[in-house]
Amino acid sequence: MTIFWAIFGLLFVFGGPIIYGISVYIRQSFKHRERMQERRNEELRLQIQLEQMRNMHTSGQNVPPPSGPLPKGASWEEQVQAPYEMGYQQMNQQQ
């Protein structure tokens, strides 16, 4: 029974600082990961901005690209349908 109380006393005395140390280490590692992710995001944002500026410089534009969504291209069905309808109209006109 005295061994139980000895182990309990040691855990009570040394357990708190050990748990506190582990929690501080975990918090610092999360903060470090967050800072590194923010740095990586900033690096990627600057790379994209640099690439956009290079593209504007090579094309000779001084206007920044629009921030809105780009226009949607024609779907495959529309691309196939358009020449077919044009050919049909030309056949009707010839007759």
Image (spheres, helix red, strand yellow):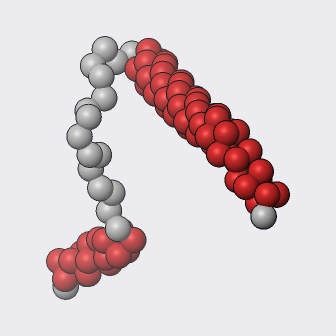
Image quarter of the N terminus = bottom right
For the point 77% across and 51% down, the residue is: 6
Q: Is residue 24 above or below residue 95?
A: above
For the point 31% across and 14% down, the residue is: 62
Residue 19: x, y in percent? 63, 42
Quadrant in the picture for residue 13? top right
Name the side, left or right, on which 28 lies relative to 92.
right
| Numbered-mark total | 0
Residue furthest right as drawn: 3
Front residue (pair 10, 59): 10
Q: Is residue 6 above or below residue 13?
A: below
Examine the rendering and report whether any part of residue 59 can be seen. no
Residue furthest front as drawn: 2
Q: Is residue 16 above or below residue 79?
A: above
Front residue (pair 19, 72): 19
Image quarter of the C terminus = bottom left
For the point 33% across and 57% down, the residue is: 73
Residue 93: x, y in percent? 17, 77
Residue 78: x, y in percent? 31, 71
